[in-house]
Every structure is written in C-alpha cells, then in structure tokens.
Image (cartoon, rainbow, N blue to C red):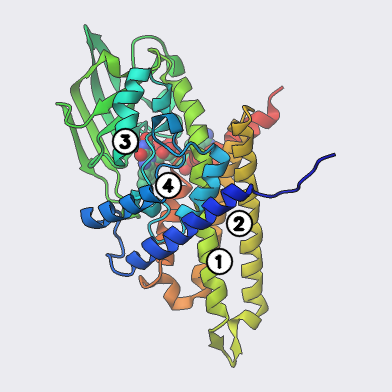
Amino acid sequence: MDFTGYQLPEELKMLQTTVRKFVAEEIVSLEHEIDYEAIRLSPEHYRRLSQKAKAAGLWCLGEPAEYGGGGLNTFAYCVVREEMAQHRNGLYGPAYGVLGNPPPAVIYLGTPEQIQKFAVPVIREGHETYYAITEPSGGSDPARAIQTRAKRDSDYWVLNGTKVFIAHVDVAEWGVVFARTDSGKGRAGISCFVLEKGTPGLSFRTIPVIRPLYPFEIHLQDCRVPTSNLLGNEGEGFALLAGLLGKERFPYSAAHVGVCVAALRMAISYVKQRETFGELLSRRQAIQWMLADSDIETRAARWLVWEGAWKMDHGEDYRHEASIAKLFSSEVLMRVIDRVVQIHGGYGVSKDLPLERWYREARVRRIGEGPSEVHRMVIARDLLRD
Ligand SMILES: Cc1cc2nc3c(=O)[nH]c(=O)nc-3n(C[C@H](O)[C@H](O)[C@H](O)COP(=O)(O)OP(=O)(O)OC[C@H]3O[C@@H](n4cnc5c(N)ncnc54)[C@H](O)[C@@H]3O)c2cc1C
C-alpha cells in the first residue's frame, strides 16, 4: 500500500508560504498606516500592490487558468485563502483585493460569450461584483421569498423588485440577480440575470450594519436587461444558485480558519509577556485551556474545510460537507475571537488591535451565506433522508 500520509504537495506548501509572506509584509504592515475601518486601499496602494502580486504569480489564484486565473482547484485555493485572511480586513476583503477579486462562480455556467464579456474583465482588472438573492421577505428560504419579477419584453427582460443586504453594489461593474420569471412556481420559477452597472432603473441605499463593509438595499424599477444576460436557462436559476453557493462555501470557511490562526498567534504571544498577580498569563490554567480549545477547534474546522473541498475537486457530492464546513467554521471563529479578546483584557476591545473588528465581523458570518440554523436543518435533512 502506497500511503504517503497527510502532506500538502511541496508546490502548494511553497505557494502557501509565499502568500503568507506577502500578507505579512505588504498588507499587515500597511494596515498600521491606514484607517482602522478601511475596507479598500487608495488607488495608488492598490495599483502598486496588485502589480506586485501579478509579478509574483499570485493574481486570481482560484480562477480558471483559461480565463487568466491561477487555476488552483478548490482544495489548494482553500489553503491559500486561509493565508489571505490573516489581517484586519481579511474576512470580508482578503488582501484588499490586490490578489484579485473572484467573480460570482455562477458566471462560469454562462455561455462562452458571457464568460468573455463578464468574467474575463473581472479577472483581468480586479473589478468587484455582487450577487443579489436576499429580499425584504427573507434570505434563508429564497425559493419562497424571492418576489422580484422579470417579465420578457422582446429582446429584454424587465426587472422589478427590491433586494436587501447586498454587498459591493456601490462599486461593482455588474452583479448576478435572482428573479422570478413566469416559467414556474417555487424553485422552478427563478432565473438568474447579469445586471450591469448604470442600468437605468437601478438605484440603491446603504444599510449601516455592525461591520464596516456596509451592504445595500437595491431597487429595480423597470430595469431592462438584454436576453443575452440570462445565465443558464429560464427557470434554472435556483439550481445554479444551490450548486454554486456550495462551491463558494469552502474558501469562505477557509477564511474563518485563517482569522482563528492569526488571533491564536496573537494570544500566544501576549500571554508570554503579560503578567498578573506576579505570574505570566501563560502559566494560568484558565488561559491555557482557552488556548488549547481554540487550537483544537481551529484544526477541526480546517479538516472539515479540506475534506469537503477535496470531495468537490474529486467530483463527489459536497453539499453536506459545505454546510458542515460553513456552520462549524463560523461558530468556531466566534468562539476563538471571543476567547482571544478575553485573554487581551481591555486591549481586546480596543481599536489598536484587529480583534475588535474581527469580533464584529465574525458575528455576521453566522448569518450570511446561510445562517447556522438553516445549515443545521440541511445537515439533519440529509441524515434523515431514506
Ligand atoms: C452584512 C450582510 C451582508 C450580506 N450580503 C449579502 C449579499 O451580498 N447578497 C445576498 O443576497 N444576501 C446578503 N446578505 C443576506 C443574508 O444572506 C441573509 O441575511 C441571510 O440569508 C438570512 O436571511 P434573513 O436575514 O432574511 O433572515 P430570515 O430568513 O428571516 O431568518 C431569520 C432567522 O431565523 C432563522 N431561521 C430561518 N428559518 C429557520 C428554520 N426553519 N428553523 C430555525 N430557524 C430558522 C434564521 O437562521 C435567522 O437566524 C447579507 C447579510 C448581511 C447581514
């Protein structure tokens, strides 16, 4: 039996180290200079660092090579994504986009013309994009909640409705919008459209939230979208959505692992130099147990992400694992950040450290990309299926 053990391939380990160094040397150091709540870099910093990343072969690593990306599979991209998250803005803006901004994966199910028109410029230029599913009527159960309507009018679809909590709309070149067409009820009636920036009838307002990357409420009033912007077939939008959200959940979850790693590293360093009652914090069992529990849970989350990503790359059904990875990693993130804040005492909640920001952002991660309750429901439904 040829069994080589649980080792990452050498090439992947080298890439992991390169990304780790890039984030530590270029991003973490820059964060000391810029605003604590910054979610984007100045155009000068963005240009300088993205050119550096491109020259180092670190640009858009997870996107298909045929469209200008690095061509990593999901497993390898998760390994890299864990490193990309290890800085203050890392959860919602890995490396501030200087390593590229992946478009919504659903775009790759479009026609070759759609991929060329929409995905390729995003990969080349690092544009931001969005996906708009959630509506005022709800986000957990989009098959029932989506009320935005798309009506066919010769060569156009005319969209009317409201979406809420949609991130990146203010700067995006385009987004994917899920709307109800006339083709059926429930899941079967939902279609997916590319909505381009500046489309007449598209307006939005900010929804201030706990994290600095504010989402938007979008209003669509008689937005005319060319029929060539329909992704997949009419009425198949929900199937695209279900498949592809699953795919995006492994890198999303890997970011949770990355922030846990960074927070735990800070805690270990702090307890080795902070003294109370004449003794270092590192000598206190109450503190040691917090560190031990955080390490165990972080490693467990990583294995769940890697297992699911590996299954996906091997063509196996990964949806159960995607729910497990998203649910567990987001809850571990909250617990680990909470412990590390506690270990740092008052500094834990000060804006001198990234912990306070991670703490607020971690709270959102249990709601976005499917709230914990919905993932538990999906996991249980799979287990109980005959
Ligand atoms: C900051 C932020 C950014 C976001 N970005 C985007 C985005 O870019 N695009 C986008 O489309 N959406 C986005 N969302 C929306 C997000 O996906 C939804 O908030 C989420 O899906 C939950 O939907 P809801 O808020 O309507 O809650 P609801 O669906 O109303 O659910 C409310 C609560 O009830 C729980 N619940 C629901 N069903 C059950 C059940 N059967 N059993 C037990 N409990 C249940 C849920 O878990 C939740 O906690 C964002 C949200 C936030 C907060």
Look at mark 1 in the image and give the residue it sits on: 264
Q: Measure the C-alpha gap from mark 3 to mark 2.
A: 32 Å
Q: Residues within 10 Å of mark 2 (few under 14, many from 20)?
A: many
| Residue 330 visible in the picture | no
Q: Does the CB distance between marks 1 and 2 fall below 8 Å? A: yes
Q: Say which of marks 3 and 1 sits in front.
A: 3
Which quadrant: the N terminus?
top right
SS for tag 4? loop
Q: Measure the C-alpha gap from mark 3 to mark 1.
A: 34 Å
Q: Measure the C-alpha gap from mark 2 to mark 4.
A: 29 Å
Look at mark 4 in the image and give the residue it sits on: 57
User: Residue extending furthest top?
Assistant: 154
Q: Residue at x 69, y 50 (%)?
A: 7
Q: Residue 378: horizontal and vertical position, in percent?
A: 58, 33
Which of the marked residues, 3 or 1, is nearer the chain's N terminus? 3
What amino acid type is highlighted by mark number 4?
Gly
User: Residue extending furthest right?
Assistant: 1
What amino acid type is highlighted by mark number 3?
Val
Q: Measure the C-alpha gap from mark 3 to mark 4.
A: 17 Å
Q: Residue at x 29, y 40 (%)?
A: 125
Q: Say which of marks 3 and 4 sits in front.
A: 4
